[in-house]
Image: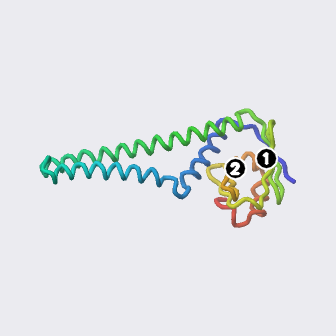
Amino acid sequence: MYEVSYVQTREIARREAAALVERLERRQGRWRWFVVRHAAVLALCVGVVLTLAVAGRASADGAARGLAVLVPAVLALTAFDVWRARRRVRRAARRWSEISCPPGTQVRGRWSAERVTFVLPSHQVALDLSTIVTAERVAGVLVLEQEDERAWTVPDELLGDRGLAILAEALGPRLRGV
């Protein structure tokens, strides 16, 4: 058994939150509803302008000018909405990371070939390594994803000298990005 500890900082919490957000944004279907909603708004705007042109309420030049203004405006609003959505998710992940493990908290990790245990002052979490589907290293954080789609973030500080070697031996090809 290998044991290591570190003290949580805001910078580590930011790295953990960023790794979780990246994992969430890459998840299949994450942006589907967003794309459908914005495509529907664009189609509605184009449909209204074309309907006005076909009904004779707008000239062909007027419809072209209307589309020249509406399409870039909808695309700009879509870009703004993407930025807001990503910002909201990043902020929530950072807040959750700081609430679940506040800065200044002493965290210990116990590493073995079968199990990883994270010990905090208030509780401990034991992960059976056989339940880990993938483990990926992202920007100084190891993201362990379980069968039930729960994810755990492990900063490099908690891996220590031998934690990554123990995981590489236990997980084999399930460990990526090392």
Q: In the image, residue 14 lies at what x, y percent?
A: 62, 40
How many numbered discs? 2
Q: Are marks 1 and 2 in contact (CB under 8 Å)?
A: yes
**Which residue occupies 65% across, 35% down?**
10
Cα distance, mark 1 to mark 2? 10 Å
**Which residue occupies 70% across, 33% down?**
103
Q: Name the quadrant of the C terminus.
A: bottom right
Residue 125's tag is: 1
In front of the other: 162 or 86: 86
Q: In the image, residue 76 lies at what x, y percent?
A: 35, 44
In front of the other: 69 or 18: 69
Look at the picture and state if 161 lies above or below 5: below
Quadrant for residue 79, please give it. Answer: top left
Residue 152's tag is: 2
Residue 2 horizontal side relative to residue 7, left or right: right
Look at the picture and state if 147 lies above or below 81: below
